[in-house]
Image (cartoon, rainbow, N blue to C red):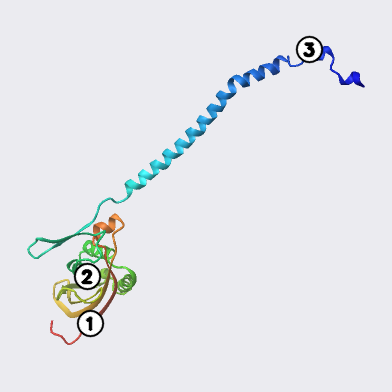
Amino acid sequence: MGFFNKDTPSEKKTEGKNPYLNGADEWFERYGSYIKHAHNWQIIAVVSLLITLVSTAGNVIQATQIKVIPYIVEVDKLGRTSVVSRADSMSVAPQRLVQSVIGTSITDWRTVTADVQLQKNMITRLSFFFAGTAKGILKEWFSKNNPYDVAKSGKLIHVELKSLPLPIGGNTYRIEWLETTRNHSGAEIKSQRYEATVTIQTSIPKSEAVLIHNPGGIYITDIAVSEILNQIN
């Protein structure tokens, strides 16, 4: 039994001298570190590429954002600038600007003209100044009083503001106007005065479209209209 458990001299002599194994060991010793370093550089390259892509995407997003700071400029009757303030930091909108928005919105809303493009422009402007409950009221009104259909029926409506909108408390204003209905020949059909209480809200413009059409961020959020009866025009 002891004979078979011991290595023979010939086995000891040839142990560790396999040329193929020795060659593989030498190849791994010589080139293994190079392969490992190359693999590490590949990982670094992939990570760098991902960082570059994220950075580029961030730059593109930043470039598409509005960098223009809106300013509100109030002009007096002589055309002189009397108030200048930043719209993005303005807590209370200038009263004259609010009055202008309300007056223009009433005119755009109730006017009926034979000029189709002008009518379309007025309706488009309204979409930038009405919000909340007032937007639903406006939609319901147009569903029952389509200005294009009214014009086709031979009626045109001219709106004349009787006074500037006046504050009656908080963010609520009151405005009066006269609506004169005429036919396409200019003959008067009827004339009626109206009044409305309007609630406004200010919000900083967050898109280029709003910045262009409503730089003051003034929105009509609620409106109630009624006829004025038994009054002289």
Callouts 1 and 2 close, C-beta under 8 Å: no
**Label disc, if present, on residue 13 of the rendered structure:** 3
Task: Tell us which disc is closer to us: 2 or 3.
Answer: 3
Percent position of residue 103, x then y: 19, 70
Q: Which residue is mark 2?
A: 102
**Residue that carries the numbered disc 1 in the rendered image:** 227
Give the foreground label among 3 and 1.
3
**Residue 125 position by quadrant:** bottom left
Q: Nearest the camera: 142 or 195? A: 195
- Which of the two labelled residues, at mark 2 and mark 3, occupies the earlier sequence position? 3
Q: Amino acid at mark 2?
A: Ile
Amino acid type at circle 3 is: Lys
Q: Amino acid at mark 1?
A: Glu
| SS assignment at label 1 | strand
41 is higher (above) or lower (below) than 100: above
User: Which of these two is toward me, 199 or 38?
Assistant: 38
Rendered location of residue 29, percent (x, y): 61, 20
Label 2 and label 3: CA atoms lie apart by: 107 Å
Query: Label 2: how many residues lie within 10 Å, few (<14), some (14-19) or many (20+)?
Result: many
Name the residue: 66% across, 20% down.
25
Provide the secondary structure element on which disc 2 rests.
Answer: helix
